[in-house]
Amino acid sequence: EMTRKRKAPIKSVLLDQSVIAGIGNIYADEILFESRISPFSVTSHLSKEDWQAIIDATHRILSSSIVAGGTTIRSFSYGKNHAGSYQDHLMVHGKEGDCALCDTPIVHTRVGQRSTWYCPSCQKEK
Ligand SMILES: [Zn+2]
């Protein structure tokens, strides 16, 4: 309901803490990849099925990341002596090279002010 009229790109809405709390930049990229939805998709164009895919992907990815102790990359870690291992599972965020699913080069761009990675072939713009 809160997003039905939003024209902003879905990536920006997933990062908007007033809509959904707790999804950071790394996980927004991974959630949209697993949902096969382009980060540039106009939020109001998403169907109920698209939202279900986003919700399912969010549950799976955040649960797996918690089990792995989180993600430790150059731009984020939660302390010198603590390292999570979810970075080994990242499919697009911070990746250079080709998509693991389709061999299309991963694109690094910006959505709003945020660094964004996605596969232009697997992730469809809505
Ligand atoms: Zn791909």
Image (spheres, grey):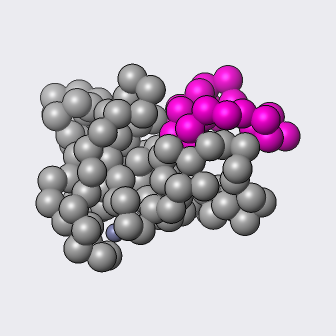
What's the residue at 15%, 60% (across, down)? Answer: 97
Question: Which corner quadrant holds the N terminus?
Answer: top right
Residue that extends furthest to the bottom in the rendered view of this protein: 102
Q: Is residue 18 magenta?
A: yes
Question: Which corner quadrant holds the C terminus?
Answer: bottom right
Viewer-side residue, 121 vs 116: 121
Ligand 1 placement by image quarter: bottom left
Is 84 on the left-hand or right-hand side of 34? left
Residue that extends furthest to the right in the rendered view of this protein: 1
Q: Is residue 90 visible?
A: no
Viewer-side residue, 67 vs 11: 11
What's the residue at 67%, 61% (across, down)? Answer: 50
- The answer to which image quadrant residue 44 occupies is top right
Give how far across and how far down residue 72 sits, in percent: 24, 41
What's the residue at 16%, 34% (across, down)? Answer: 74
Main secondary structure type of the part rendered in magenta:
loop
Viewer-side residue, 29 vs 37: 37
Give how far across and how far down residue 73 sits, in percent: 20, 40
Q: How many marks?
A: 0
Q: Is residue 42 magenta?
A: no
Give how far across and how far down residue 34 sits, in percent: 47, 63
Q: Which residues are magenta?
A: 1-23
- The answer to which image quadrant residue 18 occupies is top right
What's the residue at 45%, 62% (across, down)? Answer: 123
Give how far across and how far down residue 9 sits, in percent: 56, 38
Q: Is residue 72 visible?
A: yes
